[in-house]
Amino acid sequence: MTWITTHPLKLLSIFVCALIVLGVILRRRRNVHIPLMLSAIGIDLAMVLYLEITRHVVESVPKRPMTPLLGIHISISVMVLVFYGVQVYTGIQNSRGRRSRVHPRVAWVLVITRLGNLVTSFMLT
């Protein structure tokens, strides 16, 4: 259990993944789905901001040896951020009554990539 005290960001990342999975499960209950997903996205973006402010992760990428696993993790992380943007945009369309066919399809890709982000982050430390 030492990883719990050593890596609080990992616990927060697990929590974000749980919120995303729960949000997808409760997708038909808009009054629950929307706050869950916005909370997950907000927490995740706050973690990215925290990592950038405290560890300068973006600037440190060129200085670190680029292993295949690190390259995969960075690629997945960037894709997650792009998918967040797509989901927020199409989610707003859905909430305004314009049904987006993209939203549910990207949702499953987002779940897989966010879980991939979590797994690769554990593999890197």
Image (cartoon, helix red, strand yellow):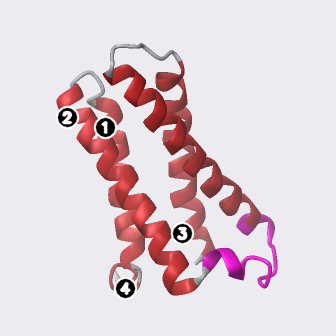
Question: What residue is pinned by disc 2?
Answer: 32
Question: What residue is pinned by disc 1?
Answer: 23
Q: Kindly identify which numbered label has been placed on residue 2.
A: 4
Q: Kindly identify which numbered label has been placed on residue 114.
A: none
In primary-sequence order, the first of circles 2 and 4 is 4
Q: Secondary structure at mark 3?
A: helix
In primary-sequence order, the first of circles 1 and 2 is 1
Q: Kindly identify which numbered label has been placed on residue 122.
A: 3
Viewer-nearest residue: 81 or 119: 81
In primary-sequence order, the first of circles 1 and 4 is 4
Does 68 appear in magenta?
Answer: yes
The residue under the point 51% across, 50% down is 115
Q: On the image, which quarter does residue 96 sit in?
A: top left
Asked whether disc 1 touches disc 4, contact meaning CB atoms under 8 Å apart, the reply is no
* Residue most extreme to the front: 96
Q: Residues within 10 Å of mark 3 (few under 14, many from 20)?
A: few
Asked whether disc 1 touches disc 2, contact meaning CB atoms under 8 Å apart, the reply is yes
Q: Secondary structure at mark 4?
A: helix
Q: Residues within 10 Å of mark 4 (few under 14, many from 20)?
A: few
Q: Secondary structure at mark 1?
A: helix
Q: Amino acid at mark 3?
A: Phe
In primary-sequence order, the first of circles 1 and 3 is 1
Asked whether disc 4 touches disc 3, contact meaning CB atoms under 8 Å apart, the reply is no
The residue under the point 43% across, 68% down is 47
In primary-sequence order, the first of circles 3 and 2 is 2
The residue under the point 26% across, 34% down is 33
Q: Residues within 10 Å of mark 2 (few under 14, many from 20)?
A: few
Q: Position of residue 77 (x, y in %)?
A: 61, 57
